[in-house]
Amino acid sequence: MFRPTLVMMLSGILLVATLGLQPAGAQTSNDFQATEKVRAKIQKIGVGPNARVEVRLRDKTQLKGYISAAEQDSFTMTDHKTGTTKTMAYSEASSVKKSGGGLSRRSWIILGAAAVGAVVTWSVVKPAFCDGGAQTRFPC
């Protein structure tokens, strides 16, 4: 009587061990830090149609759109093309980055000023040195 009970218990233990049934563990500190980093990034970017982001989820899918709502434990993202919304927990996202629309207006102004400066230098300063206007020793 004792032997069949022992054999059944051991076979049950072996079955559970081979199937890999493990108790659910608590969130690790690395996961918690990554979740807090995502939450802080979303709070910094803000909410609204101008808060365009690219979100990479933990299952490697990538979503693009804007943040339409941000709560304590989740945020809502709206696809700007279709208008569909998806609410997800911060822990589902592995990374969030602001979706840049290229260079800012300020950057374009700086680039334009640099281009104008180069053209003026090439067309005004070079002829002054090469035509003998400054009587310099620079070869042209």
Image (cartoon, rainbow, N blue to C red):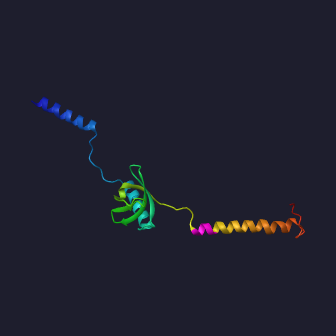
In the figure, is residue 96 to the left or right of 107? left
Across and down, in percent, residue 8 comes to 16, 32
Q: Residue at x 36, y 55 (%)?
A: 92
In magenta, the rendered stretch is 105-109
Q: Is residue 106 magenta?
A: yes
Q: Quadrant of the C terminus?
A: bottom right
Q: Is residue 48 above or below residue 4?
A: below
Say left or right for 45 vs 124. left
Which is the main secondary structure of the residues drawn in magenta? helix
| Displayed quadrant of residue 116 | bottom right
Q: Residue furthest left?
A: 1
Residue 102 in the figure: left or right of residue 93? right
Q: Is residue 119 magenta?
A: no
Report the quarter where the N terminus lies. top left
Residue placed most toward the observer, 23 or 49: 49
Counting labels gives 0
Choose top left, top right, bottom left or bottom right for residue 7. top left
Residue extending farthest to the front is: 82
Against 58, residue 100 (above or below) is below
Q: Residue at left 17%, top 35%?
A: 9
Q: Quarter-wise, where is residue 54 in the image?
A: bottom left
Q: Residue at x 43, y 59 (%)?
A: 81
Residue 115: x and y in percent read 69, 65
Q: Residue at x 11, y 31 (%)?
A: 2
Nearer to me, 11 or 48: 48
Q: Position of residue 60 (x, y in %)?
A: 41, 49
User: In the picture provided, is 120 more to the left or to the right than 91?
Assistant: right
- Residue 73 drawn above or below residue 30: below
In the rendering, at what x and y percent does residue 10 appear?
20, 33
